[in-house]
Amino acid sequence: MAKPYYDEDADLGLLKGKTIGIIGYGSQGHAHALNHRDSGLEVMVSDTAEYGDYSRGPRVIGEAVKAEMRKILGGIQNGQFAREWILENQAGRPSFLAMRQKKADQPIEVVGKELRGMMSWLKGRR
């Protein structure tokens, strides 16, 4: 059986006293920052991220996406997703591993791995 995790399972102490900066833009940056702030963390949101949320977010998360998200939530609530995941694991994860590899083979992932290899401050944390 899968183990559910809740807010109290997260160790926010690892981030206490640190400032989290949300940079860039998109439909999620501002929302993630607000979630961090609401969790009691000190967060700085760039105006770029906030602008992206306002100006691009509605274009990304439109009615079709919201309808699909409701379907996905229904599959989680009725146990369909859990049953599928359990069967996937029992079968040795063939679809999961194929999807993982497909994503890893995308040019942005290949270049990202190469760039992270050049970042000495990340050594030992990967």
Image (spheres, rainbow, N blue to C red):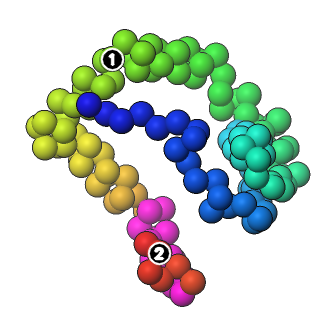
Q: Is residue 45 left or right of residue 13?
A: right
Which residue does the numbered mark 2 point to in the structure image?
Answer: 125
Q: Is residue 50 left or right of residue 77?
A: right
126 relative to 26, above or below: below
Residue at the spot 81% in from the left edge and 55% down from the top edge: 42
Neighbour tally class for label 1: few under 14, some 14-19, many 20 plus, Cα within 10 Å: few
Q: Is residue 40 left or right of residue 10?
A: right
Question: Going by the picture, which residue comes out furthest to the left?
Answer: 91
Q: Main secondary structure of the magenta part?
A: helix
6 relative to 120, above or below: above
Q: Is residue 68 visible?
A: no
- Which segment is the magenta one? 108-120
The numbered mark at residue 79 is 1
The numbered mark at residue 109 is none
Q: Nearer the viewer, residue 119 or 108?
A: 119
Residue at the spot 33% in from the left edge and 17% down from the top edge: 79
